[in-house]
Amino acid sequence: MDEEVVKAYIRAGEIAARVRDEAARMIEPGRRLIDICEYAENRIVELGGAPAFPCNISINSVAAHYTPVIGDEAVVPEGAVVKLDVGVHVDGYIADTAVTVALDERWTPLIEAVREALERALETVRPGARFADTGRAIAEAIQSRGFRPIVNLGGHSLARYRVHAGESIPNAFDPAIPGRYSPGKAYAIEPFGTNGEGLVVEDRETVTIYSLARLGLRRRLTSLERSILEEVQRRFRTLPFTERWLSHLTSDVQALRKSLRRLARMGFLTQYPALVERRRGMVAQFEHTVLITDGGEVIVTTSGSTG
Ligand code: MN
Ligand code: MN
């Protein structure tokens, strides 16, 4: 494995861990979500990285895929369970990490179950080990504490400029699940646990994150739509982005949103609706990125505590 690639992953991991922990300390009732996320995204750049995706801040039964929009007035509610998910890339090499903060101690057992699940899961990650064994460790840790893993979310392989590079690491035990950890690859391990059903569904009304799907066939586009695509291709390539990162293109926020939706309908953009627990159970998540080098050494790029 190229030494420069290893260095880029480790640097991305260091920045991600630091920003995750700093931003997590900002989570308190009444704090604006947008202030927390903009702090995180700006801090990533200040430390020499770039955001690999918009800072995700997901409250209570929202599991993932919410980032504040332009002018977002939402604040951290009293007693909330808040997931903060941060991605950093250095030269396209991505570190992906998340923590959950509970503002009411009645949710501590859920948080601890998922934190424990990540620790047990990381013990299974080594060259040649089966993804299925990670799924087993996660499911056992969460179920033994009386909660359910969210089985339609999971970890994933990472590649240059690709957050989801094709392989999935299950959050449930299924011995038939194929796949093994390969040297030279990076993986995000991310258990989710809930007191609900253990499934997420898409909230199609809440789309705040997009990525480029394809280019071409530009002649039917408005000038704003064309400039969105050019900007996305140049700045984010295939990485996810959000409307806040395009606000300089127009002062008309409604036009910007309408253009993003239309580009998604036409197939130029992929949209990522917010993911909500189906029975509106409370959701906790912890995530680390692991790099498996040629020497067989496993490096947890997001070093430090998981909370
Ligand atoms: Mn993540
Ligand atoms: Mn991830």
Image: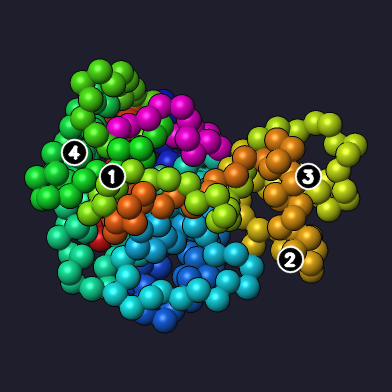
147 to the left or right of 205: left
Distance CA(mark 4)–CA(mark 3): 43 Å
Tag 2 or tag 1, which sits nearer the N-term?
A: 1
Tag 1 or tag 3, which sits nearer the N-term?
A: 1
- Label 2, secondary structure: give it: helix
Q: Amino acid at mark 2?
A: Val
Residue most extreme to the front: 279
Q: Give the magenta part as a residue range.
A: 158-170
**Residue at (86% x, 43% y) in the render:** 221
Distance CA(mark 3)–CA(mark 1): 39 Å
Residue assigned mark 1? 198
Between marks 3 and 1 in the image, the one whose residue lies nearer the viewer: 1
**Is 167 covered by the magenta stretch?**
yes
| Quadrant, the N terminus | top left
Between marks 1 and 4 in the image, the one whose residue lies nearer the viewer: 1
**Is 182 covered by the magenta stretch?**
no
Tag 3 or tag 4, which sits nearer the N-term?
A: 4
Tag 4 or tag 1, which sits nearer the N-term?
A: 4
Distance CA(mark 1)–CA(mark 2): 36 Å
Residue assigned mark 2? 253
Residue assigned mark 4? 139
Tag 3 or tag 2, which sits nearer the N-term?
A: 3
Q: Amino acid at mark 3?
A: Glu
Q: Amino acid at mark 1?
A: Gly
Residue 177 seen in the current view: yes
Vertical comparison of 201 with 183: above or below: below
Residue assigned mark 3? 230
**Residue at (76% x, 52% y) in the render:** 259
